[in-house]
Amino acid sequence: MNYVFKSVLPGRRVTILICLLVLYSQIPGAFAHSLYIQSTRFLADNGKSLPLFFCYGHHIPVADGIRGKKLNRVQVMSPDGNTTPVTIRDEVSLHSYMVDYNTPGTWTLTAETTPGYYTVYTDKKGKERHTIKSMSKIRDKAKEIHKSYFAKQYAKTYVACETPSKNFPARAGLALELVPVNDIFALKPGASLELDIYMDGKLYEGKGTWDATYMGFSTESEDTLYPKTEVTGSRLSIPLPNTGRWFARYSVKVPAPEKDRDKYLQMKLSATLTFQINNKRKTPKPEKK
């Protein structure tokens, strides 16, 4: 959407823009934004500082800004297992933060969103409504409730400093996590990425939905190389036909626990993984004379 503010006084432009952002953040598409954590590079020299940043939305590799309050936790895990929390700024942006890669081996970057509600209902006048409130907050307005979620997302990526760790640190301890079976830095074009799915520290054997794509496959919203597919069981296998930056996503919906059934019907958890398959140098280095 494009909005023209030429006829609006400067002091009112900000107010109108804020109203539009608030409205946009409450529509269904905005609520369903996916979160991916990325690094500007996935191979770092020892002693180098590189930014991490986020993709939040429906377009790969970057889309919309994310509110600082939407990020509940961002952490950097060094090869020795020490975890450092990132201080999240109170702003709307791609939330880029510098990471000091000062120890050789595989580093793990993770993030979690602040959980929130999403309810679709028909009001007493027969109009369909979408809200980011729980069922308990809108029952006096609702004639029928169609969907009601409590949602949270978990994002992860890896960066190798100088060289990957001998023992690949696959698991980061997220509540829902895509865990590579083998060292992700050993992947070559034509291979398949084998992923184990963990929920609450255990292999998850239930139903879920996955999709995956790579940067440059499409510029369209939610147009992925591998469309959303429902699967059952704790293992995923994703064929990787080419080099580039890849994005994998997996989500589950489970019934609300009995104590929360007045607030929502289902809990929706999503896990994303970003990684890169490196290409060989396409342009030969010039010969030394």
Image: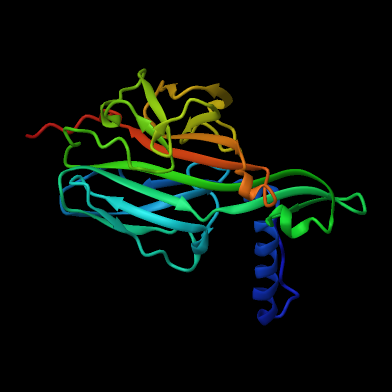
Q: Nearer the viewer, residue 74 or 189?
A: 74
Q: Is residue 94 visible?
A: no
Residue found at x 33% / y 47%: 109
Where in the figure is residue 240, as x and y percent of width and height? Answer: 40, 23
178 over 17 or under it: above or below: above
> Compared with residue 19, is residue 72 higher up or lower down, i.e. above or below?
above
Q: Quadrant of the C terminus?
A: top left
> Would residue 74 appear left or right of 5 to someone viewing this image?
left
Q: Position of residue 139 (x, y in %)?
A: 79, 55
Placement of the N terminus among the 4 image quadrants: bottom right
Name the foreground residue: 208 vs 256. 256
Question: Does 165 sit above or below residue 261?
Answer: above
Q: Exactly how many numbered labels are in the figure?
A: 0
> In which image quadrant can residue 97 be found?
bottom left
Q: Residue at x 36, y 65 (%)?
A: 87
Colour pattern: rainbow
> Does residue 79 appear in this view?
yes
- Between 147 and 97, the residue placed more toward the observer is 147
Drawn side of residue 156 relative to residue 206, left or right: left
Q: Is residue 178 left or right of residue 78?
A: right
Residue 163 lies, with reference to residue 71, above or below; the image says: above
> Outermost residue toward the right?
125
- Residue 7 position within the rendered picture, expressed as x and y whole percent measured from the top left: 75, 75
Q: Which residue of the protein is positioned furthest toward the front in this rendering?
A: 259
Q: Position of residue 203 (x, y in %)?
A: 41, 29
* Residue sitting farthest toward the left: 289
